Amino acid sequence: MQFWINVVVLASTYALLAAGYVLIYRASRVLNLAHGELMMLSAYLLFALAGALPHQPLLTIPLTLLIAAGLGVATYYLLIRPLAGRPLFSAVLVTVALGIMLQGLVVLVWTPRVQYPAVALGITNQPHQLPGGGVISTLDALTVLVALALFGLLAAFFRYSRLGVQMLAAAENPLLVAQRGIDFHRLFAVAWGLAIATAALAGVLYTLTNRLEGTVALVGLKAFPVALVGGLGSLTGALPAALLVALAEVAAIQYVDPLLSNVAPFLVLLIALLVRPWGLFGTPEELERV
Amino acid sequence: MRDAPPLPRPTASAVYPDWLLIRSTRQWGTLLAGACVLAVFPLVAGPFAVDLANQVALASIGALALNLLIGSAGLISLGHAALLGAGAFTVGILVQEVGAPAWLTLPSAALVGAAIGIVVGLPSLRLKGLYLAVSTLALHFVVVFIGSEYQTQHRLATGIVVPDLALGPLVLSDPRAWYYLLVGTAAATALLCLNLLRTRTGRAWMALRDRDLAAAAVGVNLTAYKLLAFVISSALTSFAGALGAYYQHFVAIEAFSFFLTIQYIAMVLIGGVGSVAGAIVGAAFVVALPHGVNLALGTLPVPPQFKLYVFAVQYLLFGLLMAAFLLFEPGGLLQLWARAHRWGLALHARQPPPTCVPLPDGRAPAVTRSTEAAERAPLLEVTDLTVVYGGLATAVERLSLVVPPGAIVALLGANGAGKTTTLRAISGFLPAEAARITTGAICFAGRTLNGLPPDHIARAGVVLVPERDKIFSTLTVEQNLAISGRHVPASRQAILRAAIDTYFPILRERRRQLAGYLSGGERQQLALASALLCDPRLLLVDELSLGLAPTLVEQLMELLAALRRDLDLTVLLVEQNAVAALAVADYAYILATGRLVKEGTAAALLADPEVQELYLGVSAQRRSYREAATER
């Protein structure tokens, strides 16, 4: 029972992060290798805000998400958009550059010391006994609920809102969207903003339950296999893929070797590349566009 | 405009065999002088400088290998540290387990690298694009795991000790001896890279870097060549890792972090992607950078945490430099150097963008026109347009055309004549396709369209119905229509909506269907309707007839004529099907291989015997235009 709770909680974190990879990939065909670092930076921002406004999580957390969305938009306009029309690797390498830059920046500003934002925010994390015999903490339960809610909201957004439909259209054919008089860069920027805000959400929840340090970025990177296994263009695929990857990771830690924690998601990814490179919910045609 | 800078003149005879790397006495001179400096350097330099030079040479080998991959084949690997690590650990493990000599360990390391290249490359390289980056990222974590497992299992927490490199009787313990070995190996690697690029293989790589599809079209086996590039690069990288293990006398997995991969990518980016000299310059820069940082931190007044966390300063600096070069100088330091040289010229070479000069009385330029419509001020005027793809292929050359308001003008010609390119130039699509307008101006209603983003052009009233991908197949018909016309005032939108309901009743019926399931004719109608909802003053239609039955084409052409009347439209129609186009057009231009070959009113062209034969299929014996042209 506890095993499965651990899987679901980890899967929720991964699903939140994978949603960001999918949003960004759909919008700009970029693998954002700075996703983990942007998530980490957001968590540090919350930590800094909590220092200025202690014990007000309901104010500081939304503020953090807002700033994170701004960071996403800025990343798109400053780093990704100027590289349009350049070789495919340019945009990916610029995210690698952004990632290492943020790694350095975070240490210079906050030192490499381990921090505990939950303490600064005045949040206590209670364990709850579940009927089946497992234990889940308040924040872990919240993570699961937030992940489910976010996927529901995103599905509704892409189905019913005008902006969402425009974003779907831009993902399929940005130049045709431009022909309809719409600035697709604005739509892509919105996608980046949404993606980094979800990453921030994942980062905030993860660091509130665990702890905050530079290696947190790795959690973000480990969610990348989830996005790929689910199908890079598919939000729906991210949910089962997150469960699959989390299952592999938790099982590897528990039954084989705790050191496998960082490798397990990438092993799943390698297997996926061999047997179903377009992912659970992608289509083979999608590959052509990668 | 100034003339281009004069090309360096060869000093010997003008024709050289293709395989000659060095083609002039001056180059020989430079090379010999360089070799002398390199040979003498360790004899006069101190131990620190020699060590630094050794590190540069060692890094150069890895950078050259990565450059082969990124610069030549356009692939990226994020597993460079893993491959270096695999080479180093091959040495470490062979030495630790069986005490293997270097003549065995070094080739083994290269083989291990090649094997990894095949195993990781095979699944990801049959896919396009970035999958190699993804699988090599996975490789990184796998190698780090295996390395640290090995170290813990054998209680080698601090690493594996490696003896002096011994090749037969020669034992390299002196940094100076290492210097000659490493510089020699780096030079050999550079030579290998230069030579590879000049072979058929190298040309195939560059073809795949520039355009996957185009390379496939000319018969390059993509997967095989990509795999070959990755295997050679991996083998070289692991070999460099193995040499590094001997040089450091030490192997520990901690040295092969992701930051090492980033450093090697930085070498290639900073030096100049695709250039052999660039990789070496980049290696030198990246090896020297930490020393520069230390020096700067020691002398500059910086906050204390900068001195405490030097690694963080380096991270920040590497990130900034990589981003800066990617964004502002993709050619790297070498390009920067060349630019600095040409500074004066570059300042003058920049051309001002062309502007629209309103004609004195609104008349078209002095081209003979017979239609009444052409006498009025043109709505669209393209003057002297030249479009170049990828800096090489000229798709349209010095094309001028005029579209008067209210007219239907057709642009005719065979496949590849430059018709679509002209439309894409007008609608601002070219920057997204690595194409450029090199000369000419596009004026629409007195406004210059050159350089405007496509959405601005659409909102200005120039709307394109493209040849392919003209609808959003993942959206419903209703959603497709809803995307359009957000910038159109509500009153006008109502009029357009009503017109669409009258002219395209089928779309109403199908409004809840996914557009991807529509038939060809319905797609064309949806595309037209979506374009009309954007309230165009000028509608550009690319190949209305493509893939549709003749009766359907006729109907659509008539529809277009009716729409022009009712909605006060002007239409520029691109067509291969000249019969259908001339039936509705007032005036037509005929293009062949990017140039204007004929123009006239529809009636005049229909009566022209040459046009009849070449484009209307009137002649009993149909011939292609090209055949007829060569006969003339």
Image (cartoon, coloured by chain):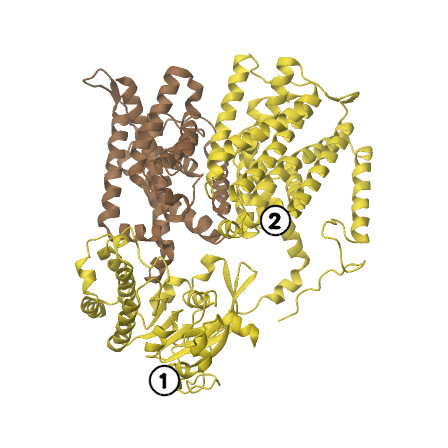
Chain colours: A brown, B yellow
B326 over B318 or under it: above or below: below
Local SS, label 1: helix
Res B515 seen here: yes
Locate residue A214: give its quadrant. top left
Res B311 seen here: no
Q: Which quadrant of the figure contains the N terminus of chain B? A: bottom right
Question: Where in the figure is residue B547, as x and y percent of width and height?
Answer: 34, 62
Residues tagged by mark 2 and mark 1 found on one chain of the structure: yes
On the image, numbered disc 2 is attached to which residue? B203
B165 over B312 or under it: above or below: above
Q: Amino acid at mark 2?
A: Arg
Q: Which quadrant of the figure contains the C terminus of chain B? A: bottom right
Q: Mark 1 or mark 2, which is nearer the start of the sequence? A: 2
Local SS, label 2: helix
Q: Which mark is residue B373?
A: 1
Nearest to the observer: residue B139 or residue B283: B139
Indicate the chain on which mark 2 is placed.
B
Verify CB contact (< 8 Å) between mark 2 and mark 1: no
Question: Would residue B189 be found to the left or right of residue A198 on screen?
Answer: right
Disc nearest the viewer among 2 and 1: 2
Q: Amino acid at mark 1?
A: Ala
Callout 2 crowding tier (Cα within 10 Å): few <14, some 14–19, many ≥20: some
